[in-house]
Amino acid sequence: MTTPLDTLGLTALPPEDEALRPAVRAFLREAVAQLPAPQRARSWGGHDPAFSREAGRRGLLGLTLPQAWGGGGRSAFARYVVVEEFLSAGAPVGAHWIAERQSAPQILRFGTDEQKRHHIPAICRGEQYFCIGMSEPGAGSDLAGVRTRAVRNEAGWVLDGQKIWTTHAHHAHYMIALVRTSGSTADRQQGLSQFIVDLSLPGITIRPITDLAGDAHFCEVFFDGVQLPADAMLGQEGDGWLQVNSELAFERSGPERIFSSVVLMDAWLAWVRTPQGRTPDAVRLAGRLLAQLAPLRAMSLAVTQRLADGECPLVEAALVKDLGTTAEQLIPTLIADDLARRPAVQVPLELLQTLAYTQQVAPTYSLRGGTREILRGMIARGLGLR
């Protein structure tokens, strides 16, 4: 039977994946529902290994990974449902987030059997955490400007250089780092390779960076003569550019690029539903925000379908990320404007605290996963405009 979504050509969540929601919501009611909204608004940065291990025990991590490696063997839509529920509830996903979202699929695609055995089952259990070694001082989102270098020696590789804005590096066990193994920055995309770096090795220094909101989940990471084993390389030497772009499609396209401000939005909507908070302007604003999020979610699901089909939709993922983070940043601004228009009304303290935090952290939304300028350049090239 044809559904409205079929008629419009939109991607729908398969019923078997949609059916995951009740169990996920029951878990979240136990785990996070009683936490105050300002704490739940820190979902991305919330580092809670106990939560991650319990999510792994319940089979909610690694859903798209093969059962042979400890995963769920399900489609990308199953993970989409779980991530959507985690972010909507404000669950502390920061511990397992990067490893489960992109490091494990990257290792599955490019890693050796030994790398898969060592990392993927532990990631699926919520016990092993990764960070992303891409950005560098002076290069930012220009990944082709990477200067960190690995030089081959008889024991493997010696790593020297620096990464920055590395989320949760101080909590992570491993980093997948993009580094130069030949040539220079003048060679741009050539000569780049990826390595799985054990962050407990000698010669590695990690310094957290405190942000405007008082959090310290971004880090600087320094490599000073770090001896890597010969089997630390992920994939083939010189294929780093191809591999890292494959990885970024996972990072840029999911509900995480839509829902960063959703805890604030829910707290505001709950107040707008009360007699004290409801005004015609607020109701119109609620409709405006929902009207923006609905097509973004449809676009995100369409990219998920492309990923599920084994494609690498780089331009489409970049478009979702750019539009999604723009909407995420707009939400706290418009909610703040709404509250400022009625200064005589007493606004709940929890809502004000959630707004204050979200306003402080929102500028980072368009930085993580690639800056707006870099993404728009990618989109323009993909459309043949430059």
Image: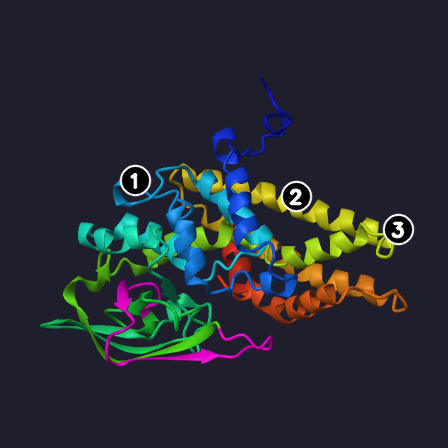
Q: Which residue is mark 2?
A: 294
Tell me the distance, in whole angstroms, between the alpha carbons under discs 1 and 2.
33 Å
For marks 3 and 2, give the one nearer the viewer. 3
Q: Are marks 1 and 3 in contact (CB under 8 Å)?
A: no
Badge 1: few (under 14), some or many (20 or more) residues near its Cα, within 10 Å? few
Write the start and end of the magenta stretch as one range: 187-216
Residue 371's label in the rendered image is none
Say which quadrant the N terminus sits in. top right
Mark 3: amino acid: Pro
Residue 383 can be seen, yes or no: no
Relative depth, front residue between 318 and 64: 64
Q: Is residue 75 above or below residue 366?
A: above
Q: What's the CA distance linking mark 3 and mark 2?
A: 21 Å
Check disc 3 and report its element: helix, strand or loop: helix
Question: In the image, is 33 to the left or to the right of 102?
Answer: right
Q: Is residue 4 left or right of residue 208?
A: right
Q: Residue at x 43, y 69 (%)?
A: 168
Circle 3 sits on which residue?
A: 280
Display colour scheme: rainbow
In x, y percent, where is residue 215? 54, 74
